[in-house]
Amino acid sequence: MDLDTRFPAISDLRARARRRVPHFVFEYLDSATGVEDQHHRNMDALRAVHFDPAVLQGPYEPDLSTTFLGRDYPLPFGCAPVGMSGIMWPRAEKIISAACRDAGLPYSMSTVATVTPEDLTATIGDQGWFQLYMPSDKGIRSEMMTRAKAAGFTHLILTVDVPVDSRRERQRRANLTIPPKITPAMIWAMLTHPEWTLGTLKEGIPSLKFVEEFARDTPEYNSIAHAGHIIRGQPGWSDIDEIRAEWDGPFLVKGVQEASDADRLTKAGVDAIWVSNHTGRQFDGGPACLDALPRIRDALPDASIIYDSGITGGLDILRALALGADFVMLGRAFHYAVGALAEKGPPHLIDMLKDDMTLAMGNIGAKSLSELKDRLVRETVPGL
Ligand SMILES: Cc1cc2nc3c(=O)[nH]c(=O)nc-3n(C[C@H](O)[C@H](O)[C@H](O)COP(=O)(O)O)c2cc1C
């Protein structure tokens, strides 16, 4: 199958994934919250950013490499943490992390993955980042960090834009529960997606493997409810200091949109600010995530900044870089890719993004990523 002809864009991978996985799985991955306006605002804001192409800049051999937090990367993007990743396709965490390792790109494992950190030691190489949903119990918090480090994860990401749950109505309508409730609709969905179902049964029903190891029956909770409770630690500013003191590698805070927060985090010793609004999955009433980038970059010219939320192709990556990001992450795209094409999906996605970026750079007339901001059409960027 010629992947480039059949799936030239992320939208093609999304369309195929939608056919290949049961409805409740696709809705889990694809849904935002509310009427999903913020999700669309994220994408519209990216599309509204234009570049002024410079002509006669040949020869065109754009350099897409970058250095982030003292480390060289051949391309300026990687995979964001996605909980329950393994529900999208059997072994998804292993498949995506191996593709990222092979391409020299970072892969982030979620606290609520369907694997433990040790399960990924063989596939992350030295490109694994571990994402923490902060446990309320500090003993559990320390143990999770220690295990992630021992398993080979080099960077710690603390996610701070999930202070409480969100409704995600589309996901609710699709009736995905953890653990899965076996209903006639679910049995039908499984029968009509035999490849997903057989692979999933072979791997074992997806569950929050890492968190479950800490869960137990308590007077207040049964063990499943306790697993949910463990990861709802609702971090505050003092936790930043405590985690910073405990984790001796790069420490990233994800879900930041205010320059004053970014400033305070940087002063607390956080190594990188991760600008994200969870791709609109948490709250439907905020601004486009991209709007925060120039503000934060302006306030903190020397900070290391990551951007995610709403990236739909290589050109969007260039847009985020031009507006002040040093690095860009994608969540759903890697999962559409694995749902659409299993092992072949994530490497194809990486190639597609690389090609798209290379050609867009040539058409913009930029030879390196740092030249992009000079080619922005300033009127298309809020706050510039
Ligand atoms: C299905 C799904 C699950 C997610 N789970 C997590 C998670 O466990 N931890 C986290 O920090 N972010 C999580 N995110 C947010 C992603 O890390 C990232 O911010 C977002 O997907 C980026 O936007 P994009 O999907 O438009 O690329 C999740 C996103 C999706 C789509």
Image (tube, grey):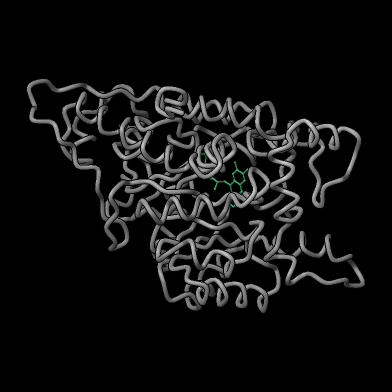
With 118 as the anchor, is 382 left or right in this view?
A: left
Quarter assignment of residue 341: top right
Relative depth, front residue between 17 and 3: 3
With 11 as the anchor, is 172 left or right in this view?
A: right
Q: Is residue 376 above or below residue 226?
A: above
Residue 24 visible in the shown view: yes
Q: Residue drawn at (50%, 56%), measured in percent from left and top? A: 108
Residue 130, x across and y down, in percent = 52, 63
Residue 230, x across and y down, in percent = 73, 65
Q: Residue drawn at (73%, 34%), measured in percent from left and top? A: 193
Residue 150, x across and y down, in percent = 51, 77
Q: Is residue 305 above or below residue 17?
A: below
Residue 26, x across and y down, in percent = 67, 34
How many circles with numbers are drawn on the protein?
0
Q: Residue drawn at (35%, 48%), measured in percent from left and top? A: 327
Relative depth, front residue between 253 and 140: 140
Residue 277 visible in the shown view: no
Relative depth, front residue between 201 and 212: 201
The furthest residue to the front: 1
With 30 as the anchor, is 99 left or right in this view?
A: left
Q: Is residue 382 above or below residue 73?
A: above
Quadrant placement of the C terminus:
top left
Quarter of the rendered structure image containing ligand 1: top right
With 297 as the anchor, is 260 left or right in this view?
A: right
Q: Is residue 374 above or below residue 326?
A: above
